[in-house]
Image: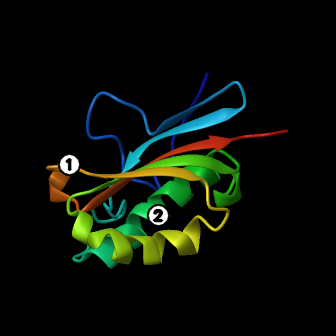
């Protein structure tokens, strides 16, 4: 296994890693919308979705791949009423339309409105 790490995405806030590459697959921890430079989160679901997607992109870049290599995401929303607005941002990044689950949860770390967990194929 090879650990994936970058300062361009938020550091882990617990006993876990940002991601790992194993057997040609990339597994990324869930990304909440924390700005890695400031530690702040923007207001509003669209702004938070944008930052969470940028964080995923930074980790994919650290793994040497892009969004087109993503095969599966799991998205967590604090409010399913945000589903359409979240999707309007998500679809700009995940243009290859990977498999996805999207669920509403009671709470997310740091009071975030969304979180995105990602699995990608490293390929040759």
Front one among 95 and 64: 95
Q: Is residue 86 left or right of residue 107?
A: right
Q: Secondary structure at mark 1?
A: helix
Q: Is residue 77 left or right of residue 16?
A: left
Q: Is residue 88 above or below residue 23?
A: below
Q: From what the image shows, is residue 1 above or below residue 76? A: above
Q: Can you give x and y, in whole percent of width and height, for residue 27 in the image?
A: 54, 36
Which residue is at a point 33% across and 69% down the rendered structure image? 83
Quarter of the view holding residue 44: bottom left
Q: What crowding class fits label 2: few (fewer than 14 Cα within 10 Å), some (14-19), or many (20 or more)?
A: many
Look at the image and tell me in which quarter the N terminus lies.
top right
Q: Is residue 102 above or below residue 42?
A: above
- Can residue 70 be seen here? The reply is yes
Q: Percent from the top left, x then y, of residue 18?
A: 44, 39
Residue 107 picture location, percent across and down:
15, 50
Q: On the rendered image, what quadrant is the C terminus found in? A: top right
The image shows a total of numbered marks equal to 2
Q: Which residue is the site of mark 2?
A: 53
Q: Nearer the viewer, residue 15 or 77?
A: 77
Instruction: Please rate how many residues cluster around mark 1, counting C-alpha atoms within 10 Å: few if below 14, some from 14 to 19, many from 20.
Output: few
CA gap, disc 1 and disc 2: 16 Å
Q: Which residue is mark 1?
A: 109
């Amino acid at each position: 296994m090879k650990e994936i790490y970058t300062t361009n995405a938020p550091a882990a806030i617990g006993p876990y890693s940002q991601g790992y590459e194993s057997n040609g697959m990339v597994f990324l921890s869930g990304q909440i919308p924390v700005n890695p430079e400031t530690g702040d989160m923007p207001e509003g679901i669209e702004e938070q979705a944008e930052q969470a997607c940028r964080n995923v992109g930074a980790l994919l870049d650290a793994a040497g791949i892009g969004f087109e290599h993503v095969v599966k995401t799991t998205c967590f929303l604090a409010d399913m009423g945000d589903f359409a607005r979240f999707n309007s941002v998500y679809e700009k990044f995940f243009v290859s339309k990977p498999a996805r689950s999207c669920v509403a949860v009671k709470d997310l770390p740091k009071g975030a409105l969304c979180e995105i967990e990602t699995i990608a194929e490293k390929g040759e």
